[in-house]
Image (spheres, rainbow, N blue to C red):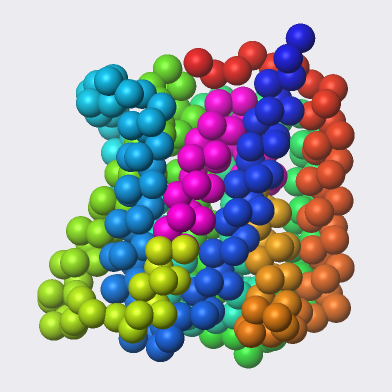
Amino acid sequence: MQNNYLRGFTLVIISGVIWSFSAPLVRLLEDAEIYRLQYLLYRSLIITLVVLIFILFREGRNFLNTFKRIDSWSLFGGLVMSAIFFGWIYALTTTTVAITLLMLGLSPVLSAFLGYLVLGERLSRITIINMMIVITGITIMVWGSDKSTTILGVIYGFFVALGFAIYTITIRKNPEIPKLLTPAIAGFFCMIWAIILIIVTDSSFEIPSVNIGISVMSGLVIGVGLILYAFGAKYLPSGELVMLSLLEVVLGIFWAWLPILGIHEVPSTNTLIGGCAIVMAIILQGINARKIHIIPMP
């Protein structure tokens, strides 16, 4: 019998690895604080194109019929994710990569709570234990963080964590309706908001050439990750889904530290210890995944 749980586990793990390059890419932007809106505009354009091209390749002649199956949850999820895009870039340009990613680590707890309230999902004992390990790891990491970090950056990070938890619930709701279009909807909404704000603030649509390249790469990273995450959502409860994607937190901090990338944000000892705890929880969940067979969502 094919283990669909393990398939979902693998897809979400891969999405977390891919997403882990997103935060370091933002750090490579030229004058990031000045070109936030332009970055969001061009990155969202790429995300939308990546998802639509994938759906076109997958659906073929039924491509247009996919749009007819969009429900209110898909629209709401896209709206929430577009807001997350804004919160993410503002968090990364306000505080460190580590703090932003650490706040994202709150998502599993928020997702599990919302999954219980909205979807009536139950979590296995091993998942609850692993979530406690994740919380412990995050606590250790935050405890070792720079206490001078601005409150605003932390608020942005919490906003992203809550938004991602809500987004996860929307793609788990009404499983009979495909949710692959939700990321494309998110990219479209984000483009609209960015264009409006650029016009209102009398800013230019032009950005340095290096930022264009980074926007394209970031769009590819986010777009591909969202596709894999949506597929993984078919097989995993909300709390587990987000917990496994937390590999993004650990690897993102590592990439930001890696001197060869030119960012070199050195994590504290506590950050490393907490990161190891999160990795251990993910490994334990993976071992458990091999023993579990669940009925996938259609």
- Percent x, y of residue 212: 36, 73
Residue at point 73% right, 14% down?
A: 2
Give whichever of 251, 57 is nearer the camera.
57
Q: Quadrant of residue 95?
A: bottom right
Residue at point 50% right, 16% down?
A: 298
- Percent x, y of residue 169: 48, 37
Does the magenta-highlighted stretch encompass residue 195? Answer: no
What's the magenta bit mostly, secondary-structure-wise?
helix
Left-right relation of 81 to 244: left
- Percent x, y of residue 259: 72, 83
Residue at point 83% right, 26% down?
A: 290
- Percent x, y of residue 258: 73, 77
Left-right relation of 129 to 154: right
Residue 82 in view (yes/no): no
Residue 230 in view (yes/no): yes
Q: Quadrant of residue 192?
A: bottom left
Vertical placement of 138 versus 178: above or below?
Answer: below
Residue at the top extreme of this rendering: 1
Vertical placement of 114 versus 174: above or below?
Answer: below
Give whichever of 56, 172 is nearer the camera.
56
Give whichever of 219, 13 is nearer the camera.
219
Quadrant where the N terminus sits is top right
Vertical placement of 23 versus 79: above or below?
Answer: below
Does the magenta-highlighted stretch encompass residue 228? Answer: yes
Vertical placement of 221 versus 92: above or below?
Answer: above
Q: Which residues are magenta?
A: 218-244
Left-right relation of 151 to 59: right
Give whichever of 122, 255 is nearer the camera.
255
Residue at point 13% right, 76% down?
A: 200
Left-right relation of 2 to 125: left
